[in-house]
């Protein structure tokens, strides 16, 4: 696959572009979002390029989805007070810009009255 066809997250996983990585395991990487929408905003990303969104991941590898959730919980405890919002944007009209499945883990004092990240 040509470099320009691969997502920015695939390139971070490959070590081709830098990121502020806070977690790295066999199947998951997590790093701070470059444009944070909360005091703590970490993107939790399965390393596989097989799934474009959470619906595909849930159908294809539910255990990996569970691992994403458990990782978010651990990171919320490590980097904040353990409470968090988990957002999976699914589709362009709701803000998905990277078509490599990922969860936004948002923590800290969040704005009230919106579920948007
Ligand atoms: P989404 O809009 O749900 O597809 O989320 C993509 C997220 O990736 C956005 O919140 C971006 O700010 C974030 N992002 C894009 N490029 C980078 C990068 N190089 N390092 C960290 N986060 C990034």
Image: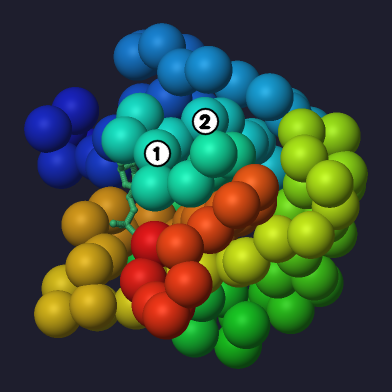
The residue at 74%/53% (across/down) is 72
Q: Nearer the viewer, residue 70 or 39?
A: 39
Ligand 1 lies in which image quarter?
A: top left
Q: Which residue is labeled 1 in the image? A: 36
Is residue 17 at least partly visible in the picture? Answer: yes
SS at mark 2 in the image: strand
Marks 1 & 2, CB-CB < 8 Å contact: yes
Q: From what the image shows, is residue 34 above or below residue 40?
A: above
Residue 33: x and y, percent? 43, 36
Q: Which residue is labeled 2 in the image? A: 32
Using the rendered view, name the quadrant where residue 25 is placed. Answer: top right
Q: Is mark 2 within 8 Å of ligand 1?
A: yes
Local crowd size for mark 2, using a 10 Å CA cut-off: few (<14), some (14–19), many (≥20):
some
SS at mark 1 in the image: loop
Is residue 64 at least partly visible in the picture? Answer: no
Local crowd size for mark 1, using a 10 Å CA cut-off: few (<14), some (14–19), many (≥20):
some
Classify the position of the C terminus by image quarter: bottom left
The residue at 49%/85% (across/down) is 55
The residue at 65%/47% (across/down) is 108
Q: Is mark 1 within 8 Å of ligand 1?
A: yes
Q: From what the image shows, is residue 31 above or below residue 108?
A: above
Residue 100: x and y, percent? 39, 55
Q: Is residue 1 left or right of residue 23?
A: left
The residue at 68%/24% (across/down) is 22
Query: Residues under labels 1 and 2: Cα distance?
Result: 8 Å
Classify the position of the N terminus by image quarter: top left
Q: Nearer the viewer, residue 65 or 5?
A: 65
Q: Identify the image's colour scheme: rainbow, by chain, secondary structure or one colour.
A: rainbow
Q: From what the image shows, is residue 117 above or below residue 35?
A: below
Q: Is residue 17 left or right of residue 54?
A: left
């Amino acid at each position: 696959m040509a470099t320009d066809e691969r997502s920015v997250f695939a390139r971070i996983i490959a070590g081709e572009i830098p990121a502020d990585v806070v977690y790295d395991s066999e199947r998951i990487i997590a790093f701070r979002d470059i444009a944070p929408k909360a005091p703590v905003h970490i993107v939790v990303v399965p390393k596989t390029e097989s799934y474009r969104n959470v619906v595909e991941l849930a159908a294809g590898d539910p255990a990996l989805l569970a691992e994403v959730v458990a990782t978010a919980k651990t990171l919320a405890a490590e980097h904040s007070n353990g409470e968090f919002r988990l957002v999976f944007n699914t589709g362009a009209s709701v803000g998905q810009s990277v078509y490599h499945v990922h969860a936004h883990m948002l923590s800290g004092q969040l704005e009230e009255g919106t579920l948007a990240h």
